[in-house]
Image (spheres, rainbow, N blue to C red):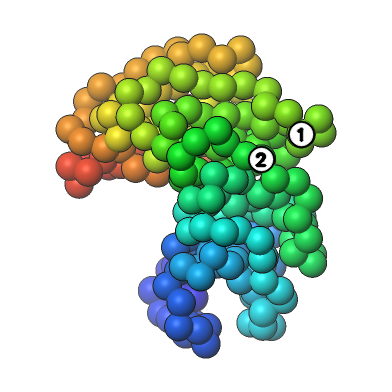
Amino acid sequence: FWEARTRKELIGPPPQTQSVTSIAFSPDGKLLAMACDDNLVRLWEVEAWRQRTNLVGHAGFINDVSFSPDSQFIVTASDDQTNRVWRATNGQIIVEFKVPSGYSFSACFSPNAKFVLTAGADRTARVFDLVTKETLLELKGHDDVLRSASYSPDGKLIVTASADGTARLWEAPPSYSLAAVREFQGPIYPLAFAKEGGLAVIASKSDLARVS
C-alpha cells in the first residue's frame, strides 16, 4: 500500500510467491482482492492486513477482478471461458456465466449491481442479468479481441476497447453502437469513465492515454 499524497509505502507486499494478475479495492475500502497466476483470488482485510479467504474454482488464468458497488460481491474473468460472481464475506460462488468460446478478459458490475458486463476474445461484450442468470445483451461490432468494457457511472452507457484499434460507445440497453473512436494505432487496453460520466479515458499500445 502507498499513501497517494506522500507516495510513501505504508504496507509491504503480502507473503506469497505468486504473480498478481489483477487487483481491486472494495468501494468501502475494507477489502482487497488479488487475482494470482495460480488461478486463485486472495481476499484480504485491509485494516487488519490479514487474509480472509481464497476464491477457488477457476480452471484458468484470472484476467480481471472487480467488486460490486455495495462491496458485497466480486466478479472475476478467466481464461477458462467463465465469469464468476462470488460473495465477498465468505468466497462462496453465487453464479457462473459461461461464454461460447475464447478467453474472458474483463468483467464488472453495473452501477445498480443488477448486471455483469464482460468482454472477451470472441470480439463480443455481454451483459448478464444477475436475477434471471441469463444473457441480456450481446454487443458485437469489433473486428478483434475485446480487452475491456466499462459502464458509465449512471449505467446508461457502455464503452468497449478492442485490439482492432477502436473504442466503441454503446447505449445500454438497447444494444447499438453510438460512436466508434478510430484514433489509435494498435490494440486498446483497459479503460474507464470519469465519475461525472462525461469523459472516457482510453489507453493504447502506442503509449498514449486519451480522454474522449
Residue 147 left/right relative to 118: left
Above or below residue 98? Residue 138 is: above
Tag on residue 133?
Answer: 1
Q: Residue at x 54, y 65 (%)?
A: 39
Q: Residue at x 78, y 50 (%)?
A: 94
Residue 201, visible in the rendered structure: no
Q: Pinpoint residue 91: horizontal percent, then vertical percent.
A: 74, 64
| C-alpha separation, residue under disc 1 versus residue under disc 2 | 8 Å
- Residue receiving disc 2: 97
- Three-letter amino acid code at the position of disc 1: Lys
Q: Pinpoint residue 193: horizontal percent, then vertical percent.
A: 48, 36
Q: Pinpoint residue 163: horizontal percent, then vertical percent.
A: 30, 35
Q: Nearer the viewer, residue 37 or 71?
A: 37
Q: How many marks?
A: 2
**Residue at disc 2, secondary structure:** strand
Q: Nearer the viewer, residue 206 or 29?
A: 206
The reply to whether discs 1 and 2 touch (Cβ–Cβ < 8 Å) is: yes
At label 2, counting other C-alpha atoms closer than 10 Å, the crowd grade (few under 14, some 14-19, many 20 or more) is some
Above or below residue 122? Residue 67 is: below
Q: Residue at x 66, y 40 (%)?
A: 97
Residue 7, visible in the rendered structure: yes
Residue 136 left/right relative to 25: right
Residue 123 left/right relative to 170: left
Q: Quadrant of the C terminus?
A: top left
